[in-house]
Amino acid sequence: MTTTLAADSIDSSKSRRVEELPHAAVRFAGDSGDGMQLAGTQFTNTSAVLGNDIATLPDYPAEIRAPAGTLAGVSGFQINFSNHNIHTPGDKVDALIAMNPAAMKTNLKDLIDGGILIVNIDEFTPIALQKAKYEGDPFELPEFQRVRVYKVPISKHTLEAVKESGLAPKEAERCKNIYALGIVFWLYDRPLETTLKWIHSKFGSKAGVAKANELALRAGYNFGETAELFPVRYKVRKASLPPGRYRNVTGNQAAALGCVAAAKLAGKPLVYSSYPITPASEILQELSALKAFNVRTFQAEDEIAAMCSTVGAAFTGAIAVTGTSGPGVALKQEGIGLAVILELPSLIINVQRGGPSTGLPTKTEQADLWQAVMGRNGECPMPVIAAESPADCFWAVVDAARIAVKYMTPVMVLSDGYVANGSEPWRIPTEAELPPIASRHPTDPAEFQPYLRDAHGSRPWALPGTPGFQHRVGGLEKEHVTGDISYDPANHQLMVDLRAQKVANVAKDIPTPEVYGDPQGELLVVTWGGTFGTVRTAVERARDEGKSVSHLHLRWVNPMPSQLGEILARFRTVLVAELNMGQLEFLLRAQYLIEPLALHKVQGKPFQVAEIQQKIDEILSGMK
Amino acid sequence: MSTAELPTLKPKDYKSDQEVRWCPGCGDYSILLQLQKVCADLRLKKENTVFVSGIGCSSRFPYYMETYAVHGIHGRAPAIATRRNVNLKIILFNNRIYGLTKGQYSPTSELGKKTKSSPMGTVDYPMHPLCIAIGAEATFVARSVDVDVKHLQETLRRAALHRGTAYVEVYQDCNVFNHDAFAFATERSVRDDNLLYLEHGKPMIFGKERNKGIRLNGTTPEVVQLGAGVTADDLLIHDEKAPEPTLAYLLSRMRYPEFPEPVGVFRAVEQPTYDDMVMEQVRAAEAKHGQGDLMKLFNSGETWTVN
């Protein structure tokens, strides 16, 4: 089905049918310089303010600007919005906006049958088609029979629409993403206010640019309204989310807010030391703008320096955090080991990406679990928590800080590219939901011993500047209680045991994980980290179909919750689904002597709901 | 700042209860003692002083000071701290050998040096720490010698008083693995001929007889004999306050035996420190936005309410 716009076909007198949908997924795709992330973010914010539940997935190449028009340079932003609680950006999209042939080519497979494909036909030049490796007219190809194609001269329309702003053609044409956004706003019956407000606050000082963007947005919207192109308009009503005030956040924004909150709750300055690395850099950027919160950001010269300065900041009594991705963690591990033996609190936020080595910087993966749990020399345990969604990055950081301070230990917070760049509504916590983080500093010099432990197994946190508590800590093994250097064999055994016990004690602070579905039965799917949403959706759907399957999601992965072994034993089969080659599966086998089934994926992409459902079906049918 | 009300501390007050475990005769002892004297001399508050070290024999240093201290891991921080002008003092114990690991060559070992890990001699060109510190535009750069206790003490004292990063290289004798590596600078009979004691505003004269000097020939320094038409007026005048580090760098390149090696303060200039600038930004942000209100931050941007 192909609809081509005739210039004279505009007729506003006809009323359009409006169809209500429970949810819809839209993807904006174009060249990496086309502003697709921006259009997607604006669509997201408008939908969030409208009251939809949302989940987003940006997908962009590692190259800042791969050669224009090529398949490698395609950047996309997907948003799923709904009238009910959703957990994923959606496997497939209902509508695809493709700003050039390459974007169409790489994304078409994800468009549902009967889905809407809007293309900027102005960009379908012979050269562009060739760059996208199309031969002849692509729309003649059979795969276009299954979708509804709308060829819109987006570039031309944009230039016409913004003429009165006085912008030069090159600048004017850059508004085409906003024009396309206008069309999609119309298509899904969204108001323009949120984006108009954004345009004026963003470009307020450049009147011409602000005007041009406003004109482009309105023109796109009006085009949808007046051109007799789309026979149906869609409506997705508000979702019934838990009451409260909401704000849309990406995982990295939420992590940054969590850092500020943790420091405030502890009544301490925040020191965030980091070396820029994809996909973690936004946390540094966000925090560097929040100095009024007694935040000191330190852009270190390398990953090791970032970690060592984090240890130093912790020694002086700050809430000390470093953020990085997998390759950075590899470099930091010696410094993390130092934090473990010094028994100083700190957080290491690891926004995982595809590895090994530089790997896939902009793509997601969960293959740093072993690195987090086991990646240091010597017996060197540390607590590890994994954020389950963008908004959960806030809570994962706050929870981790509580544990770090209480147990005087570094804690690793695992996020991933999918969670960090994705966004969802965050219910803003009230003050009552954020109790202070209590830190204990010794007060009696006569009683002070640097490694005298409390009931939790933690040593005192004596801060430089406090008279009478001068003490020396270091990476050499130290004597129990006194902290003096000790090479005594029995003492080393004792200290290794005590450090391990302290981390094991963290399990007392971990709530019993909730089993979604039946508390026992045929099949339990176990996940950790950013795969939560996809797997929960798949299990929800399987249960709607009457299947006996439950879901257990782990936030704390080290130590494991105390009740985990008992929960696992209640199911005939356990399936561990993770974006690696079986790292949690391995830990569960080792710790609980179970033989789980596994679903692994390392393609730089999150799971799709359908993949999980298929695996569930396969297992359940094999059991009959 | 008045120091009148502070209690008088003696060098031994800065001694921790830990047994010092360096080899007898190690140059580290002298550095430890002089530093304790300087701390007492400057009445540094023990609780406000932190010693930080990396890895190696000298890195045990912090354990022996009755202050706060961290014995860390192998680091490369000094070069960068130097660039940032963090208000800290860096002391490099240079003994031209790896002592703790029992005698392999180090980055400052001379080319061709035979050690346990270089039986045919090293093929690494040695690194000159002060050249790097000056290249990073450290605001205070100095050098001293472990056995010249008066000079060492004075150099450390000046470093301690400097606001910003101070970088002090100490020629330190590892009497077990690299004994007398700096004999040219420590032997009483020769050292005055082999060292150039830098003094701000003074011509660069050296030698037991104080009859030799450093003159600039074009852009290259040269050693000249005083007398026979050459006077102090022809010599380079030391200027530790020169804003450009060019002269300091030139001095850092002078090496025995072609030249006397300069000791003392190469460079001492004032620059805003990293610490001050960081805190200034925090204060400026607070002044502009008010002290951060968590609830206001959470509720900023586009929000909506679900009832």
Image (tube, coloured by chain):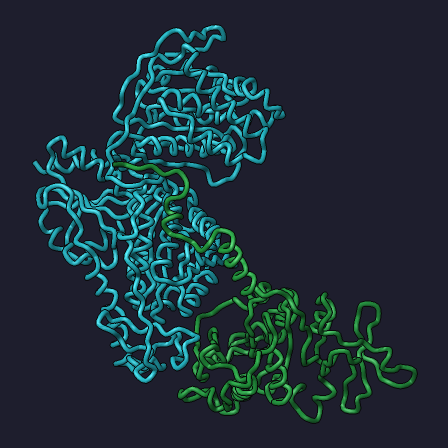
Looking at the picture, tell me which residue is in the foreground, A322 or B93: A322
Q: Is residue B291 left or right of residue A155?
A: left
Q: Is residue A67 left or right of residue A351?
A: right
Q: Is residue A145 left or right of residue A534?
A: right
Splitting the image into 4 quarters, where does residue A361 fall? top left
Looking at the picture, tell me which residue is in the foreground, A208 or A38: A208
Quarter holding the C terminus of chain B is: top left
Instruction: State whether residue A572 is above or below residue B85.
Output: above
Residue that appears at 15% across and 43% down: A516
Looking at the picture, tell me which residue is in the foreground, A266 or B85: A266
Instruction: State whether residue A487 is above or below residue A282.
Output: below
Splitting the image into 4 quarters, where does residue A605 fall? top left
Q: Is residue A522 left or right of residue A321?
A: left
Residue A222: image location, x then y, percent: 45, 17
Quarter holding the N terminus of chain B is: bottom right
Q: Is residue A451 visible?
A: yes
Taking the view exactly as shown, the residue that stands out farthest to the right is B229
Residue A458: image location, x then y, percent: 27, 71
Instruction: State whether residue A596 is above or below residue A43.
Output: below
Which chain has been coloured cyan in this picture?
Answer: A
Residue B251: image location, x then y, percent: 72, 74
Q: Is residue B258 visible?
A: no
Residue A187: image location, x then y, percent: 37, 20
Residue that appears at 47% across and 53% down: B290
Residue that appears at 46% across and 64% down: A309
Disc count in the image?
Answer: 0
Chain B: its colour in the image is: green
Taking the view exactly as shown, the residue that stands out farthest to the bottom is B189
Residue that appears at 42% across and 16% down: A224
Instruction: State whether residue B13 is above or below residue A48.
Output: below
